[in-house]
Amino acid sequence: MTPQRTGSPSVLILGAGIGGLTTALQLHRVGLRAQVLETVERFAPVGVGINILPHASQQLGELGLAPALSRVAVLTRESVFFNRFGQLAYREPAGLDAGYADPQYSIHRADLHQILLDAVVDRLGEDAVLTGHRVVRVDQDDRRATATARRPDGSTVTVAADVVVAADGIRSVARAQLYPNEGPPRYSGVMMWRGVSVWPRILTGASMVRAGWLAHGKMVIYPIRDDVDGRGSQLVNWVAEVETPQRTGRDWIQHGELADFLPYYADWHFDWCDVPALLSSTATVLEYPMVDQDPLPRWSHGRLTLLGDAAHPMVPRGSNGAGQAILDARAVADCLAAQPGDPVAALRAYDDVRRPATTNVVLTNRANPPDAILREVYERTGDRPFESLDQVVTQDELRRISENYKRIAGFSHAALRPASP
């Protein structure tokens, strides 16, 4: 175990999601003491698939988690883009196949969460994560910060630390306390339905597929577990996105109905996938409005700061929400380690590093994520099948959209270490 620094700040983390658990591991890496408060009493395997892009997988690899991740995830090999008629518009390698030193992991959120939780318990101890503690308020003075939490029996407890890092998600209590007059979430105009299906391998068996466009229905499809039935089938994650009035509030586990969106994809029978059959084979459908919130002017307020979705909730496009929380975790740990005698200044430094970077991602996810490749194809072709795509939009133009997002999000080749020759 990494020895703790004498006199180093203690850190209280609100929320044991991906951002909170990664922060605990990063703080342990630099020898700082951390404890996590989590609202739920017992963790359940919630959610569906997510992607961990090379900038974030590099951080998890440096925490020693690559072997565990590689055992359960699919290492993505390519990103491919099709129009709604099933025609290939653009293809590029991904992860290791694109020359990165670290993979792109396509993984079930529950699998990633379990890996992080096991590592926290193993390295920080059984009492590092206190479940059943719903934080209702954070207070601070010039020496300490204190979180007040309510337990399931109705009693309250206060936990003090030098610093509080609020990684408490899209309904962050800390964010609401700091910004009580903040407006409601900004709806993008797009509803999203998600699910997983046991399905034969699609394309390479490690392809991330984006197809169609929002006006008539867009799909994102990728595998997140290999050989789940002993016959080579995969657990395939899918996301359906359609422009429509907002139907529900932002709740990641809100159940949806297949009938509400399946008609958009009724004729999507392609040689690479029978999309209606894929969707219809799903046991549970989740529904979520694609929302974000305007970037904040400041995350760090004295001894309290925000991290992950609490700091920068973004429209879930670009496979980058969890990745930005993982980058936040590295930054806040490094800043606190660099200034152990002045945690307030350390949190200001973290704010200065990460807030501008994530603001760019939030705004880019609104307008020009990688999915914008599909928008260009949709608009340039007039939403019709093409004989030669190069006559209306070139591969170089589409490549520039992809490379621009990688640069803004922090995973361009220039920003990351190259693969070994």
Image (cartoon, rainbow, N blue to C red):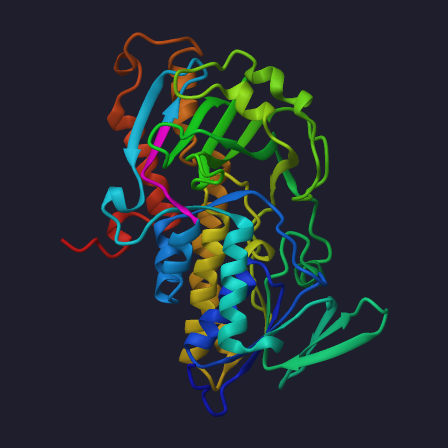
Looking at the rendered structure, the number of numbered marks drawn on it comes to 0
The single residue placed furthest to the front in the displayed view is 230
- Residue 360's place in the image compared with 187, above or below, is below
- Residue 228's place in the image compared with 158, above or below, is above
- Residue 40's place in the image compared with 397, above or below, is below
Which residue does the image show at 50% across and 73% down from the upper left? 122
Can residue 302 be seen here? The reply is no
Which residue does the image show at 36% across and 61% down from the upper left? 61
Which residue does the image show at 31% across and 25% down from the upper left? 90
- Residue 160's place in the image compared with 170, above or below, is below
Which residue does the image show at 85% across and 69% down from the upper left? 153
Tell me if residue 75 is in the magenta stretch.
yes
Tell me if residue 411 is in the magenta stretch.
no
- Location of residue 157 (image quadrant): bottom right
Q: Which residue is nearer to you in this view: 216 or 347?
A: 216
Residue 32 screen position, x and y as percent: 48, 80
Image quadrant where one finds the N terminus:
bottom left
135 vs 315, left or right, is right
Q: Which residue is nearer to you in this view: 66 or 378?
A: 66
Residue 306 screen position, x and y as percent: 58, 63
76 vs 298, left or right, is left
The single residue placed furthest to the left in the displayed view is 421
Tell me which segment is drawn in magenta. Answer: 73-80
Residue 95 screen position, x and y as percent: 31, 45
Residue 410 screen position, x and y as percent: 36, 51
The single residue placed furthest to the right in the displayed view is 154
Q: Which residue is nearer to you in this view: 34 or 266?
A: 266
Can residue 246 be seen here? The reply is yes
Q: What secondary structure prevails in the magenta region?
A: strand
